Each structure stands twice: as C-alpha cells, then as structure tokens.
C-alpha cells in the first residue's frame, strides 16, 4: 500500500512539475509579448488559488480542523516571506522581474531615508517642515562615480547640491595648481555656494574613491522656494551672511559694493517668490548654437528637431574656452557630458593603441557623444590642439530635455538601435552581441516606461554584487515549488487523485517557468543553465511529493492539517508575493479577468472527479 502510494505521489509530482521545463523550453523558441505572458501568469495563479481552496482548505474546514490549518497557513506565509527575503539579498531577486523591481525600490527607499536625515543637517533646510523636506527629497536622485572622476569642473554652472552617501570627494583649487583644499566623506554636502548663489563652481570636485552621491536638482529647490515661507526666510538669512560675502569676494572676485548690491536684489527677488538672478552669468552662446545645432556632425540626434526643441537644447548648454593642451576627459573616465566644438581643434587619442592615429576634430563636430549616450566610459583621451571653445551638454540637462521633447526621445531611441552603437559597444566597450542587444532593449524599455526604473548601470552593479545569484535563484525557485510538492503528497493520503489540484499546479507552473526563463535569459543566463534549473526542480517536486505522502500517512489529524496548512500558506503567499505582482507589472488591468478564468478552469476539472 505504502509503496503504491509513494509511486503514485512520485508520478503526480512529475506530471504537475513537467510544465516547468516545458515553460523553459518554450522560452528558448518563443518569447511572448508581456501582456500575453501576464495573461498566462494570472491564469495560472487563478487556477492554483482555486485548487488550494477546493482541495485543501475546504476539506479541512469540513473535517472540523480549521484552527490547525489556519495556524499552519500563517506560519507558512511567514516562513516563505523570511526565506524569500534572505534569498533576495543574495541575488534571488533576479528570478522574476517583479521581485527585481521590488528589490530595487526597497533599496532606493532605504537610501532615501538616510538621505532625508542628511538633508536636515544643512543649515538652510533645518527649519523646513517634514513635508517640505519630503518634497525636496522626492526630486533627489542617486549617481555613482568611479574613483578619480570629476563630479564638476571649475567655472561650470551648478546643476545641483551634492550629498555624499558613501565614498570620498576632494575639492581642488584650480588657481593653486589643483591643490586639495578640502576632503569630504560620508554625509558631507558640497557645491553649496554655487547652488545658492548661481555662481559658477570655484573648485573642481574629484572623487578619491568609488563614490555614490545624492544630487538635489536646482529646479526642485527653486520650485519649493515659490511655496515655502520658511525656506524663503532661511535663504534670505543665508544670503545676508558673512559666509556668502566672503565667498563672492574671495572665490568669485566680486567687489564688496557689487556683492552688497546683488544680495539686496536677490533678497527682493526671493520675497516675490522667484529664484534670485545668477550673481555671475555663465556664457552660453545659445543663439549661435541654435543656428547650427542641426548641422552638428558625428551625432545625428539633433538633425530633425523642431525649432522649439532646438531652442530648448541651446538654452541648456553652456560655453567654455580652453587653452591649447587642455584635457577634456581621459580614457577610462565615466562619460557624464558631451561636447560640441564651436571653434578650435580637438584630438582624440587612444593611449591603449599607439599605432592608431589620433582623430582630429574641428568646428561643429561633437565628441564624447557615444560614451555619453550609452552611459559608458570614454575610450579615448580628448585634448585641445589649439585654443578651443566648446558647448557642453551635461547628463542631467540632457535627461530633462528627453522628458520634455518627444522628437528628441524618438531620435535617441532610433540612434541607440543603429549598427554604429552595436559596433561601438562590441569593439570599444567589449560587449558581446547578446549583451549589446540586451542593453539596447533594456534602455528602450526604460525610456518607454515613463517612470523610475533602476538604471542599466545600477542593475549591472547589483548583479555583480551578487556573484552567488545562480544558486540563490535556484533556491528561490525551489522555495516556490517545495510547498506544492507537499500539497500533492498530502492530497493523496486521504483521497484519490484530484484533477483540479493537478490542473491548478500544472497550469500555474508553466507560465511561471516561461516568465522566469525569459527574464533570466535576458539577464545573460545561458539556456542550458536555465533548463537544468527547471529540470532539477521537476525532480525535487516529484521527490517532495513522495516524501510528503510517506510523512502524512502516519501522522495525527491535527499534525496532518497543520503541516498541510504550512504548505498551503507558503503557496498562497508565493502566489500573491510573486506571481500576481509579476503579472500586473507586465499586463496591468488584464490580470483580473485572466485570474478569474484560471480559477474557473481549475474548478471545471473538479467536474471530472
């Protein structure tokens, strides 16, 4: 009897779980659209919910064992949540897109809370109400800089206020042969004076180690200034301080008389709820750039823009003159700006290949553009051959332009999908063809989303942090499947094979494996490894069902329904924690109806018993 029961459980486990490798195999040859995948996942979730309700919960209630079942369900749910969180911290979050998105949102929230406390330490913000601090913090974004990277250059306009989340930054004085005048560490703020006065930076900010910064955009600060009397009063007092007067006189070379006049004018402007005029205007030559922007060579994204878009871009750049021999960027530096030559000559030198002749660029040529648009590292060093004037477009300004200009966004999408970008990523950034294609798909998806999604660089860094991710993913998948195997084993002890339960498990396993396999292969996992993961889980499910039948055959009714509840709680929590969020992320409102259809489909199989 026992041997037959064990074999029956083993067979039922194999049948219910064979849809796992079937889903992975399907993903090898067919990757459905996200709404279709969402429909299948929600259908499977509905079928599984129906099977659990009919074949586990209802029999326990009818037998008068609700309390051990409920207690087991609660413990099972808590157990799943704890183990799931543990595995996600080691890279298990990569098994599903929804868990990946949740992982990054949770990590962002933790950083966000730390950043809120840091902002409260800045004098001007100390008296702000929590809601006003929150309003500023909602606009703050995080950016990672490798060691020895310039955050900003001297004489550049301020783009924001910087707070160090982790790492070290040095401030260099260009008038003292780039001598280090200040070293900053975790929680320190810098760029403060340029931020509040509108003056160009008087120093160079250089990361000493790998550094992550919080950046508060100037536009967000100016917006709050229009609505917050507390901030208006704090800024007025700060602008009247001796610290501001000393900075403007000593670091910006403004006479005491002109400083006094500017402070008076700035205070009056702030009282009328408007941002104060810059104490020193940065040269932009925006009208000149507006006339020639569509003729810029080496980057085609500006060619088909409207006059309004061209005017907006020209208003975001600034113009800088550099002497002969000036280095714009070094090979291997992270690209956070692109350049357009107004006059002069620039040489691009590949120091890793001395045989390669320097590329000489002249008027209306763009440079640094490919690394800038792909968010990678410069593959050459750019040096001015003569006195050179360039327009500079920074990353933050460019991102804001993308949000406001559909034509520019369309041009960038088109450019990123061209062969030139693929060739650049393969030949200059050492991507293989598959990596380049995945990178492009991910960036296009991010641009289409219109909401916060972790950047490709942050996603890559997170994956590199979790080198044990394949094992964690496999354990996470096993965490999803072991409770199902116990449910199969328990269901065979006191009844015949339940068609509704088998159908529910089979129908839920297939889309889960299909969705996860698509995601893992897009993240770079080879198909062979993905197939082995799912095939091994089929064996684990079958063995778990057999062991479950042995265990449940000789236990008391209380323990039987308690352990059955434990397994059911894990499965129910898994459905709500992973399957339904994954379906909603991919398909939106379609999942409600498809869940209902799946529920009815499993119920239909009950009619065959």
Image (tube, rainbow, N blue to C red):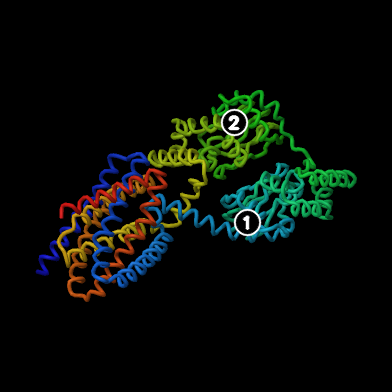
Residue 256: % across, % down: 89, 47
User: Which residue has dot 2 on it?
Assistant: 366
Residue 383, quarter of the rendered image: top right
Residue 462: % across, % down: 46, 54
User: Which residue has dot 1 on it?
Assistant: 164
Q: Residue at x 52, y 30 (%)?
A: 411
Q: Residue at x 29, y 51 (%)?
A: 599
Q: Nearer the viewer, residue 225 or 399?
A: 225
Is residue 196 shown to the viewer in this render?
Answer: yes
Element assignment for label 1: strand
Q: Is residue 70 above or below residue 134?
A: below
- Relative to residue 66, is residue 16 drawn left or right? left
Position of the C terminus, as image quadrant, is: bottom left
Residue 190: % across, % down: 69, 53
Disc nearer the start of the sequence (1/2): 1
Q: Is residue 296 above or below residue 220?
A: above
Q: Residues within 10 Å of mark 1 (few under 14, many from 20)?
A: many
Residue 301, quarter of the rendered image: top right
Element assignment for label 2: strand
């Amino acid at each position: 009897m026992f041997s037959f029961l064990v074999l029956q459980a083993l067979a039922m486990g194999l049948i219910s779980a064979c849809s796992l490798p079937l889903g992975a195999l399907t993903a090898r040859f067919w990757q459905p659209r996200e709404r279709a995948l969402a429909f299948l996942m929600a259908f499977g979730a509905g079928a599984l919910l129906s099977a659990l309700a009919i074949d586990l919960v209802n029999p326990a209630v009818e037998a008068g064992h609700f309390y051990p079942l409920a207690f087991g369900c609660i413990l099972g749910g808590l157990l799943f949540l704890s183990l799931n969180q543990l595995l996600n911290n080691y890279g298990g979050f990569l098994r599903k897109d929804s868990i990946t998105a949740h992982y990054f949102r949770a990590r962002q929230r933790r950083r966000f809370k730390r950043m809120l406390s840091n902002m409260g330490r800045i004098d001007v913000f100390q008296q702000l109400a929590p809601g006003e601090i929150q309003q500023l913090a909602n606009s703050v974004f995080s950016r990672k800089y490798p060691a020895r990277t310039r955050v900003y250059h001297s004489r550049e306009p301020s783009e924001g206020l910087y707070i160090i989340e982790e790492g070290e930054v040095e401030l260099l004085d260009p008038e003292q042969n780039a001598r280090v005048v200040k070293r900053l560490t975790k929680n320190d703020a810098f760029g403060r004076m340029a931020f509040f006065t509108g003056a160009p930076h008087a120093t160079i900010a250089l990361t000493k180690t790998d550094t992550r910064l919080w950046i508060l955009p100037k536009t967000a600060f100016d917006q709050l200034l229009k609505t917050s009397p507390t901030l208006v009063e704090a800024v007025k007092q700060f602008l009247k301080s001796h610290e501001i007067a000393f900075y403007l006189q000593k670091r910006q070379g403004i006479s005491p008389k002109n400083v006094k006049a500017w402070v008076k004018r700035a205070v009056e402007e702030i009282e009328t709820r408007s941002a104060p005029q810059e104490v020193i205007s940065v040269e932009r030559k925006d009208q000149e750039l507006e006339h020639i922007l569509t003729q810029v060579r080496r980057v085609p994204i500006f060619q088909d823009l409207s006059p309004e878009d061209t005017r907006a871009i020209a208003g975001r750049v600034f113009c800088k003159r550099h002497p002969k021999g000036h280095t714009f960027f070094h090979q291997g530096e992270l690209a956070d700006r692109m350049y357009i030559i107004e006059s002069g000559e620039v040489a691009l030198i590949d120091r890793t290949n001395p045989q390669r002749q320097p590329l000489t660029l002249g008027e209306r040529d763009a440079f640094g553009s490919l690394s800038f648009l792909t968010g990678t590292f410069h593959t050459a060093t750019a040096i001015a051959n003569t006195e050179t004037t360039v327009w500079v477009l920074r990353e933050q300004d460019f991102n804001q332009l993308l949000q406001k200009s559909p034509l520019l966004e369309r041009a960038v999408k088109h450019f990123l999908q061209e062969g030139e970008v693929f060739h650049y990523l393969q030949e200059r950034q050492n991507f293989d063809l598959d990596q380049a294609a995945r990178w492009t798909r991910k960036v296009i998806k991010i641009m289409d989303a219109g909401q916060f999604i972790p950047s490709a660089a942050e996603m890559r860094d997170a994956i590199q942090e979790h080198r044990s991710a394949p094992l964690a993913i496999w354990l996470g998948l096993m965490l999803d499947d072991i409770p199902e195997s116990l449910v199969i084993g328990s269901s065979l002890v006191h009844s015949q094979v339940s068609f509704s339960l088998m159908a529910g498990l089979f129908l839920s396993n297939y889309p889960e494996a299909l969705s996860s396999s698509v995601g893992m292969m897009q993240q770079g996992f080879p198909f062979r490894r993905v197939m082995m993961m799912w095939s091994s889980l089929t064996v684990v499910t079958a063995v778990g069902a057999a062991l479950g039948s042995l265990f449940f055959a000789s236990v008391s009714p209380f323990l039987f329904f308690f352990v059955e509840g434990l397994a059911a709680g894990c499965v129910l929590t898994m459905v709500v924690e992973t399957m339904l969020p994954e379906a909603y992320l991919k398909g939106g409102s379609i999942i409600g109806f498809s869940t209902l259809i799946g529920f009815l489909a499993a119920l239909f199989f009950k009619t065959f018993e």
